[in-house]
Amino acid sequence: MRLRLTVNGETRELEVAPDRRAVDLLREDLGLTGVKEGCGVGECGACTILVDGATRLSCLLLAAQLAGREVTTIEGLAPAGQLHLVQQAFIDCGAVQCGFCSPGMILAVVELLRRDPAPSRALILEGLSGNLCRCTGYHMIIDAVEAAARVLRAEAPS
């Protein structure tokens, strides 16, 4: 089947098998290896992408479900080489451990902060609940979310 979608701001047309998963399309066909496949069954969040601005697990989506949609991967957050404020906060707070979960976590945080620019710690934990980090606890990750939220609020027009 012929698939047309927008990925990281670029319109793409591809021929894909009807049973092709979105994670495979993005990683293998488009070379967007920032999309990670962890568990492959939607439990770890490593494959998180934004579809029309909402988080989705690409391991559970068929590529065909992306037809006509706008997809953002971690590569799309910094198209001009300048890090997104959430990416910078993860670095500044030491929240990037092995880095495997970071792309999914960061995209989940981007969506969370779009919905609520001043989330409580409880809402941050809830917002990250679908993303697992196997390296360490979540203390530095939560610190990074709070730091990004402070920057976002400071940059917001008053």
Image (spheres, grey):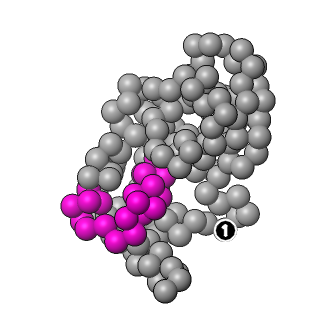
Q: Which quadrant of the figure contains the N terminus?
A: top right
Q: Which residue is mark 1?
A: 82
Residue at 76% across, 25% down = 14
Residue at 34% across, 71% down = 118
Q: Which of these two is toward me, 131 or 97?
A: 131
Circle 1 sits in a helix, a strand or a loop, which is it?
A: loop
| Extent of the magenta region | 102-125
**Residue 41, quarter of picture:** top left
Residue at 77% across, 40% down = 11
Secondary structure mainly formed by the magenta segment? helix
Find residue 129 and report its horizontal and vertical position in percent. 28, 47
Q: Is residue 17 magenta?
A: no
* Above or below for 76 versus 121: above
Residue at 57% across, 26% down = 65
Tell whether 30 sits left or right of 152. Answer: right
**Residue 34, quarter of picture:** top right
Query: Which residue reaches farthest left?
Result: 122
What's under tag 1, amino acid-wise?
Gln
Query: Which residue reaches farthest bottom?
Result: 158
The answer to whether residue 77 is visible is: yes
